[in-house]
Image: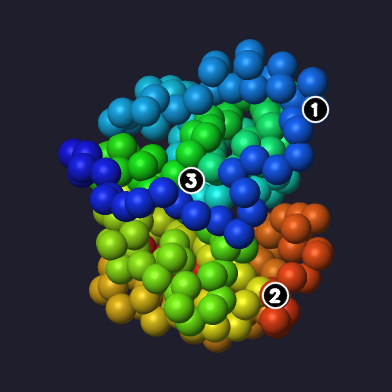
Amino acid sequence: MTSAPIPHGPLRTFGRIKSRPVKPRQQALLDTLLPEIAVPEAPFEPRDLMPEATEAWLEIGFGGGEHMAAQAGRHPHALIIGAEPFVNGVASAVRHIEEQDLKNVRIHEGDARDVIGWLPDACLTRVFIMFPDPWHKARHNKRRLIQPAVVAELARVLKSGGRLRFATDWADYAEWTIERVLADPAFRFESETADRNAPPADHVTTRYEEKKLGDCAPVFLDFVRV
């Protein structure tokens, strides 16, 4: 079963949808490789995109694609679906995919909430939300990705035992996320005693994370779908 897409306006980010001109080589990959690995813009089954995959993962807002590509390289058995509205980020990601010859990545250039709406129930084993736009001013908090409707949809598409990882370097967004994710009875912490400032063993540090643009050390929150 696939739900109707989550109603929403355009997903806004601190960065523009496009900033500097895309390099010619990256533009060539956008023109040739991206259409080959793009997800359908309609309801779809992940297993149809890569029948040999034993798991399907989703990365929401993959930035420049460093984390997504590294995870794909480490886990070739997993189909990794990434969504990102920022054109320059998508251009960077397709370069990583081409250079590393990754066969297990599929991309949506646009709003991740549309992808979530196209997915069937209980089809994912992992979801990553790594350093999303914090919208840290109180009047902008309503623009944050983590909202009850999105949490409910993530619960729908995750299998029982599936994991959701959220990372941020804004203290208020960490608390905001804990409150809203745990308000949904479908989720619990993977570990109540985990050091939330300690990068998980399978974490991939990216150049964006190293810029330290937030107001606190990175916080890593791992939740489990009950």
Mark yes or no: residue 159 visible.
no
Q: Which residue is mark 1?
A: 23
Q: Which residue is mark 3?
A: 58
Q: Residues within 10 Å of mark 1 (few under 14, many from 20)?
A: few
Q: Which residue is mark 2?
A: 214
Q: Secondary structure at mark 3?
A: strand
Q: Is residue 160 left or right of residue 53?
A: left
Q: Secondary structure at mark 1?
A: loop
- Identify residue type, mark 2: Gly
- Identify residue type, mark 1: Lys
- Identify residue type, mark 3: Leu
Q: Label 2, label 3: how many angstroms apart (C-alpha)?
A: 24 Å
| Nearest-to-viewer mark from 2 and 1 | 1
The earlier-in-sequence mark between 2 and 3 is 3
Give me the residue at 79% from left, 21% from top.
Answer: 24
Mark yes or no: residue 203 visible.
yes
The earlier-in-sequence mark between 1 and 3 is 1
Q: Position of residue 138 (x, y in %)?
A: 48, 81
Q: Residues within 10 Å of mark 3 (few under 14, many from 20)?
A: many
**Front residue of this view, candidates 110 and 154:** 110
